[in-house]
Image (spheres, coloured by chain):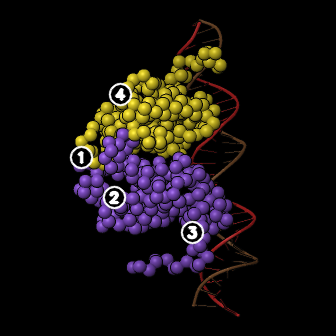
Chain colours: A yellow, B purple, C red, D brown
DNA sequence: CAAAACCGCAACAGCAGTGTTGCAGATATT
DNA sequence: AATATCTGCAACACTGCTGTTGCGGTTTTG
């Protein structure tokens, strides 16, 4: 079952796939409507080669999303969301995800695509995130009255926002601190309570 | 100066413009790559009529953005951002903006378009928002150490997020409360301090 | 009511993007 | 070294969207 259904690709072909996916990310992030031609050019490859590796434009984008969401899921798991203390895990995951999402911003920009292999990955990430937030709430890190779904969406939005402005230049840990801090305390006045 | 450079449109033509803009919002919100044909059909109008009123696809989208941003600016001003108490103004503006942005989500989805008439409107809205937040900080509503730019972007993101999920069905005031509350306090545990 | 403006309809030209095929030469695999 | 695979290139058909023009009929305006 672990063996691929199709015969394994030759080394250079596999490299082409990688290069094309990376180029697609760059080009489509700059212009979501960009053509296969532009992707091919950015990859330093002929347009026909792109079509050889990916049956259609749709297939390319789906493959891109799947590749990225796999890395994202890995980034989440690396933060040990179900064993480490919630605050620690939250910080680690945030830093990891910021790194991945910075590199694959386009590929990860359509979580709700319906009917793709990537959808499953998104559900896993979403579930893990909810578990973590639930644990955080149980341990008193989050207010008992918060809506976890809403909190998760706010968390996603903060991550997305942190990657856009000038602060995106900061090192990942500082950024993660900003995101987590904002998520937990907002912008209101601190009452000396940490 | 106040008189239009072009001769005033006939009543039915002006109505066409409005109908087309509303249809464009609906159609493009569902699919940003939708064709003029689809817009025309949704508006109950021939495709050529769309082209008669808007020189090009680009012009249509620009007009749509401008119309929406004008309403947005109005919604902000209605909240009296520079006279009312910050918290009151913040709540009112949030409710107003949620209403407008709910109706024109596509038209308002590209604040940084560069080189359009709408850009000026966006700058005005952004400036007003910053002023308000600055006043809120001066009066102790926001923490003295917060970055106003970051706070503003978080505010925008929260508004955008509030319009997507299930909570979007709630009445505008409850929604505004959720947004403002999250902005000020985040999701962390409340320390009994209001 | 008469002029002007607007609309729908049909037809057209043009263009850009997609996806396919065939072949000759380069590259990896055994 | 022999074979299978991959690539670039050129060409092609096809589709869908844009933008334009002209005309006959309708609606607003003054």
Q: CA distance from mark 4 to mark 2?
A: 33 Å
Badges 2 and 3: C-beta atoms under 8 Å apart? Answer: no
Same subunit under labels 4 and 2? no
User: Which chain hosts label 4?
Assistant: A
The chain ID associated with circle 3 is B
Please indicate, yes or no, whether residue A99 appears anywhere in the rendered image. no
Where on the picture, by quarter, is residue B23? bottom right
Q: Horizontal placement of A154 versus D27: left or right?
A: left
Q: Chain of mark 2?
A: B
Q: Is residue A68 above or below residue B9?
A: above
Q: Nearer the viewer, mark 1 or mark 2?
A: 2
Query: Which percent across, then down, holds residue A146?
Result: 44, 42
Q: Secondary structure at mark 3?
A: helix
Residue at position x 34%, y 58% in the image:
B87
Query: Residue at left 33%, top 64%?
Result: B81
Say which element carries label 4. Answer: helix
| Distance between mark 1 and mark 4 Cα atoms | 24 Å
Residue at screen point 56% across, 59% down? B25
**Residue under numbered circle 1:** B145
| Circles 3 and 4 in contact, beta carbons < 8 Å | no
Discs 4/2, front: 2
Q: Tally the marks.
A: 4
Residue at which label 3 appears: B18
Of marks 2 and 3, which one's residue comes earlier in the chain?
Answer: 3
Judging by the rendered image, the residue that carries numbered circle 4 is A88
Residue B87 numbered mark, or none: 2
Name the residue: 49% across, 58% down: B172
Q: Are marks 2 and 3 on the same chain?
A: yes
């Amino acid at each position: 079952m672990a063996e691929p259904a199709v015969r394994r690709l030759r080394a250079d072909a596999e490299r082409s796939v990688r290069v094309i996916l990376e180029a697609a990310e760059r080009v489509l992030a700059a212009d979501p409507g960009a053509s296969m031609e532009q992707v091919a050019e950015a990859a330093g490859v002929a347009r026909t080669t792109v079509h050889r590796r990916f049956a259609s434009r749709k297939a390319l984008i789906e493959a891109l999303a799947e590749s990225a969401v796999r890395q994202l899921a890995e980034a989440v798991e690396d933060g040990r969301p179900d064993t480490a203390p919630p605050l620690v895990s939250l910080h680690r995951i945030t830093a990891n995800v910021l790194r991945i999402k910075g590199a694959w911003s386009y590929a990860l920009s359509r979580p709700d695509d319906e009917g793709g292999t990537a959808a499953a990955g998104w559900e896993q990430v979403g579930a893990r995130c909810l578990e973590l937030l639930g644990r955080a709430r149980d341990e008193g890190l989050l207010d008992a009255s918060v809506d976890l779904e809403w909190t998760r969406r706010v968390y996603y939005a903060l991550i997305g926002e942190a990657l856009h402005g000038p602060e995106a230049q900061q090192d990942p840990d500082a950024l993660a601190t900003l995101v987590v801090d904002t998520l937990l305390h907002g912008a209101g006045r601190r009452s000396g309570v940490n």
